[in-house]
């Protein structure tokens, strides 16, 4: 392949990757999502867990968000269960 053709192919590959990532076709875990999942699973404060559940509900492409929210439906505190249910609904899970 000529150097110019190689450069064009490289640009096209990068553009395709950016397009795929921006459409959510490839889901990558974000540091924010990982922190929220950790807080939801392990915080001793129900207010922190419920806010983490609500925040996860705003992240539709976050891998593991739905599983973490489903697990939170079994939380001891009703506010956390309510927040998890609301977020699952917002994400389109029933």
Image (spheres, rainbow, N blue to C red):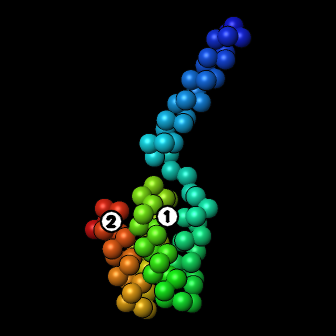
The image quadrant of residue 45 is bottom right
Hey, which residue is sitting farthest left in the picture? Answer: 94
Residue 74 in view of the camera: no
In the rendered image, residue 65, in percent from the top left (x then y), is placed at 47, 66
- Lateral position of residue 7 relative to residue 44, left or right: right
In the rendered image, residue 9, in percent from the top left (x then y), is placed at 61, 19
* Residue drawn at 49 percent across, 35 percent down: 19
Question: Could you tell me how many numbered marks the image carries?
Answer: 2
* Residue drawn at 46 percent across, 68 percent down: 56
Asked if the residue under mark 1 is in contact with the one under mark 2, i.e. CB atoms within 8 Å, the reply is: no
Disc 1 residue crowd, few under 14, some 14–19, many 20+, Cα 10 Å: some
Q: Viewer-nearest of labels 2 and 1?
A: 2
Q: Quadrant of the N terminus?
A: top right
* Residue drawn at 45 percent across, 55 percent down: 61
Does dot 1 land on a helix, a strand or a loop? loop
* Residue drawn at 52 percent across, 30 percent down: 16
Does dot 2 land on a helix, a strand or a loop? helix
The image quadrant of residue 76 is bottom left
Q: Quick one: 74 or 23, which is closer to the camera?
A: 23
| Disc on the earlier residue, 2 or 1 | 1
In the rendered image, residue 38, in percent from the top left (x then y), is placed at 58, 74
In the rendered image, residue 44, in percent from the top left (x then y), is placed at 57, 90
Residue identified by numbered label 2:
90
> CA separation, marks 2 and 1?
15 Å
Residue 58 in view of the camera: yes
Disc 2 residue crowd, few under 14, some 14–19, many 20+, Cα 10 Å: some
In the picture, the disc for residue 16 is none
In the picture, the disc for residue 64 is 1
Hey, which residue is sitting farthest right in the picture? Answer: 3
């Amino acid at each position: 392949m000529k150097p110019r053709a190689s450069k064009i192919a490289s640009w096209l590959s990068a553009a395709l990757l950016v397009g795929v990532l921006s459409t959510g076709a490839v889901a990558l875990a974000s540091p924010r999502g990982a922190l929220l999942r950790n807080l939801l699973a392990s915080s001793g404060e129900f207010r922190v867990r419920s806010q983490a559940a609500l925040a996860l509900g705003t992240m539709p492409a976050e891998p593991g968000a739905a599983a973490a929210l489903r697990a939170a439906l079994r939380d001891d505190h009703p506010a956390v269960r309510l927040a998890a249910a609301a977020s699952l609904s917002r994400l389109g899970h029933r």
